């Protein structure tokens, strides 16, 4: 019987660490954030067509010199505008969903590491349980600053966009175990 659970939580709460602990117990984890990177490149043409006008207006480029998507600059645009974020999600979530479904098909014990898994109901329906990872604000801020080297303003915008995350998971009706990290 397949077991599929989700490890979720706000940015820099320690989801990767918790997943590594599950892996020691024989679980196969997959990081949805890494899949987002792949999905962005797969949907590159649509993303460029959709968001280049906004990037020009903001005076930034959403492509790097090598032609790949500059996710940081794209993030500047997306996190500043919920409507644009929704457009981005509509482009990449179907690609991510397919990748995750393929991974689940190949493994019996799966942990999906994702911040906003609630936005993909088809995947959330496959989960039996949610592990919600919590960490204090300043702990998360320190981790994010060290790990991502983003400007403080960008980190705070991302934190703000995730302020109601726990309530979104409570709405799912799935059992939730809180892990403080």
Image (spheres, rainbow, N blue to C red):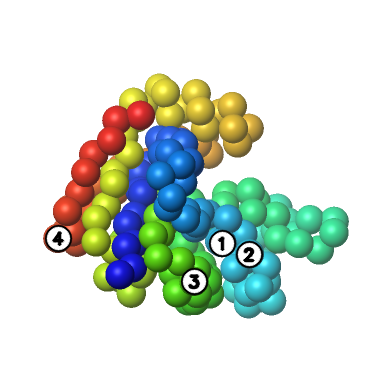
Q: CA distance from mark 4 to mark 1?
A: 26 Å
Report which residue position mark 3 lands on.
106
Q: CA distance from mark 1 to mark 3?
A: 16 Å
Secondary structure under the numbered disc 4 in the rendered image: loop
| Residue extending farthest right | 65
Q: Residues within 10 Å of mark 1 (few under 14, many from 20)?
A: some
Label number found at residue 173? 4
Is 171 displayed left or right of 78 in the figure?
left
State whether residue 147 appears in this view. Answer: yes
Residue 61's x, y, as percent?
73, 56
Q: Nearer the viewer, mark 3 or mark 2?
A: 3
Residue 25's x, y, as percent?
41, 44
Rendered image quadrant of residue 57: bottom right
Secondary structure under the numbered disc 1 in the rendered image: helix
- Most foreground residue, 103 or 75: 103
- Most foreground residue, 95 or 28: 28
Tell whether label 2 touches label 1 (CB within 8 Å): yes
Q: CA distance from mark 1 to mark 2?
A: 5 Å
Tell whether label 3 touches label 4 (CB within 8 Å): no
Residue located 28% across and 35% down the image: 179
Secondary structure under the numbered disc 2 in the rendered image: helix
Indicate which disc, 3 or 2, sits on the residue closer to the N terminus.
Answer: 2
Residue located 32% across and 63% down the image: 3
Report which residue position mark 2 lands on.
38
Q: CA distance from mark 2 to mark 4?
A: 30 Å
Quarter of the figure that contains the N terminus = bottom left
Report which residue position mark 1 lands on.
35
Label number found at residue 153? none
Residue 70's x, y, as percent?
70, 55
- Most foreground residue, 115 or 159: 115
Q: Residues within 10 Å of mark 2 (few under 14, many from 20)?
A: some
Q: Nearer the viewer, mark 1 or mark 3?
A: 3
């Amino acid at each position: 019987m397949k077991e599929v659970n989700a490890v979720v939580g706000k940015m820099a709460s320690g989801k990767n660490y918790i997943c590594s602990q599950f892996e020691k117990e024989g679980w196969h984890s997959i990081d949805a954030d890494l899949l987002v990177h792949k999905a962005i490149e797969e949907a590159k043409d649509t993303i460029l067509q959709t968001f280049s006008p906004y990037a020009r207006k903001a005076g930034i480029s959403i492509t790097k010199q090598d032609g790949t998507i500059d996710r940081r600059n794209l993030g500047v645009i997306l996190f500043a505008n919920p409507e644009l974020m929704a457009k981005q999600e509509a482009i990449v979530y179907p690609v991510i969903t397919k990748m995750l479904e393929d991974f689940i098909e190949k493994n019996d014990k799966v942990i999906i590491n994702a911040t906003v898994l609630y936005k993909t109901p088809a995947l959330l329906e496959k989960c039996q349980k949610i592990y919600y990872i919590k960490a204090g604000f300043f702990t998360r801020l320190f981790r994010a600053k060290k790990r991502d080297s983003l400007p403080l303003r960008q980190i705070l915008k991302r934190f703000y966009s995730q302020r109601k995350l726990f309530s979104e998971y409570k709405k799912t009706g799935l059992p939730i175990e809180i892990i403080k990290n």
